[in-house]
Amino acid sequence: MKKKSMSRRNFIVKNAMLAGTAIITPSLMAIEPSLKKIRIGIVGGRFGSSFHWHEHPNCIVEAVSDLVPERRNRLKEVYKCSKSYPSLEEMVKDKNIDAIAVFTEGPNHVKHTIECMKHGKHVISAVPACWGSVAEAELLLETVKKYGLTYMMAETSYYQQHTISARKMYEKGEFGNLYYCESEYQHDGLENLYIVDGERTWRYGMAPMHYPTHCTAHLVSVTGERLTEVVCNGWGDDSPYLKDNVYNNPFWNESAHFKTSKGNAFKVNVWWKGAHLGLERASWNGTNMSFYCDNRRSGAALVKKTKELGKDDAGFVQSKPKLENYDQPEWWKTDMLPEPLRHDSGHHGSHTFITHEFIDALLNERKPTVDIYEALAYTVPGIIAHESALKGGTLLKIPQFG
């Protein structure tokens, strides 16, 4: 799958011509997708072990890597792979590897993507695409452009079952004018990951809005809108985690109100402390219909506008909404996935979809759904939202990347 390698099609044509074959029929020239294989390397033995590369019919796990031997062995066990490297820097030298799945620490994603692409490897990276600065976003974009290789961000919210449903509803025009969306990422207790074996981890004191993509994908991946302006407010307490961290972050929770490129409103809450339900949820509100995904208090529901009039408890006339329970399809059971991947997986069934999307994009030499531009459209708004919170809720413009 490297850029300069001869395709199997060209190989067949060239050798047939050398053999004096007069006519090559389309059937002989056709390439069955099942015959093509992507050889992938995986780095990062925690989150990286939760995907399904070894189950994809067109993927071979060529090698795995982690700095920690126990996590490296975990990758070898999960992916049934005997080849391993003690570091990413060693693995990228393997000429048999076409692509690398980067599931390392958030602040290292850009650094490691650059290292992979320097060695001719396509990259799928865990979220966020870049860490904490617009300069990092610009560097990542420059890198992908420079090497001309495929980049994908492994955003789970794109392929959550309710997001897939919302996207299908939007494509069919069922919402009417979708004028408002809100999303929440509630994850109390993250501080348990701040210190491991007595040492601070990269998560120690990190800003909530530097990890925005599980929310921003709920709108951007459905409508294609871009987030153009933001006002954000943060809340913190006297925790030592917020008094002394490398990010100078004083907030546990951040709440942002975005304006979109269509002039619509989008509310995002990233909360890491409090009496939360612990969830990733969204709602999409339109002029004809609204969709509320399961929020652990009630199941998924549709609210449809009707022509029937009624009165509210104060006697004012209003249209009577029609409330319907929504039986959430399990999209992972459908032909949206190859047969071996049709099973439930992490983050609301998204991991098998992410696995297939990256491999299929490489096989067909097309852009993946969450390419570099989509990834930055999810990530950068959070960086600017945090700046707004640090400035007491100042309205800030969000830079755009195509």
Image: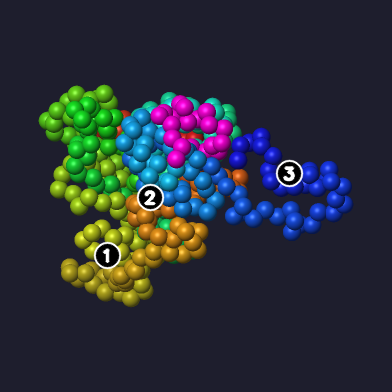
The colour scheme is: rainbow
Frontmost of labels 3 and 2 is 3
| Residue 384 in sight here | no
Residue sitting nearer the eye, 3 or 129: 3
**Amino acid on which the number 3 mark rests in the picture:** Phe
**Amino acid on which the number 1 mark rests in the picture:** Gly
Residue ID for mark 1: 299
Instruction: Count residues near mark 3 (Cα–Cα under 10 Å), then give few for <14, some for 14-19, many for 20+.
Output: few
Residue sitting nearer the eye, 80 or 154: 80
Task: Specify whether 369 is left or right of 387.
Answer: right
**Amino acid on which the number 2 mark rests in the picture:** Ser
Splitting the image into 4 quarters, where does residue 232 fall? Answer: top left
| Residue 123 in sight here | yes
Frontmost of labels 3 and 1 is 3
Magenta highlight on residue 124: no
Residue ID for mark 2: 157
